[in-house]
Amino acid sequence: MKSLLKGLLGRLVAYVGLALGFWLLYQALLQSSLLYGIPLGLLGAAAILLGMYLLVTARHRAGDGAVLDSSVLDLDVEKEGTAGDSFTGSSQSDKLSP
């Protein structure tokens, strides 16, 4: 129950931070003066980054993080017949005569 509450509260705070960040960016774009626009834009960007960090942290702490399975990725297993181009014969380099 405690981790569920932490996860929900963390996500709620993160979403509020994201909304605040995008609103600050919007306000920065509406400003005609650079004196007010640039600091608002920087605050908005910082709020968005902080909100994204909080969202990922809350998700990780709640145990909802995605678990990567090595059988799904198969990065180091080369499938036969998938490399090269059959039209130009670029996969047939071992069969070319010198």
Image (cartoon, grey):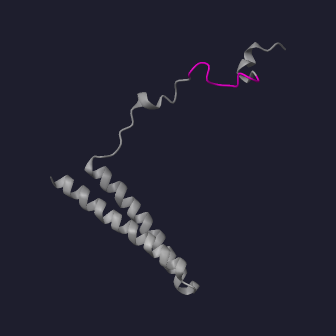
> Quarter-wise, where is residue 29 in the image?
bottom right
Q: Main secondary structure of the magenta part?
A: loop
Please identify the quarter of the rendering in which residue 50 is found.
bottom left
Task: Please provide percent x and percent y for residue 16.
Answer: 34, 68
Query: Residue lying farthest left?
Result: 1
Residue 76: where, in percent of width, then height? 52, 27
Could you tell me which residue is drawn at 39 percent across and 68 percent down?
19
Range of magenta residues: 79-88
| Residue toward you, 37 or 77 | 37
Q: Is residue 67 magenta?
A: no
- How many numbered callouts? 0
In the rendered image, the vertical position of residue 2 relative to residue 43, given as above or below: above
Q: Residue at x 43, y 30 (%)?
A: 72
**Does residue 39 appear left or right of residue 53 in this picture?**
right
Residue 63 percent location from the top left of the image: 27, 46
**Location of the C terminus (image quadrant):** top right
Q: Position of residue 15 (x, y in %)?
A: 35, 63
* Left or right of 3 in this view: 69: right
Along the horizontal axis of the image, is 10 left or right of 52? Answer: left
Task: Compare residues 32 and 41 and report the one nearer the observer.
Answer: 32
User: Which quadrant would residue 91 be assigned to in this image?
Assistant: top right
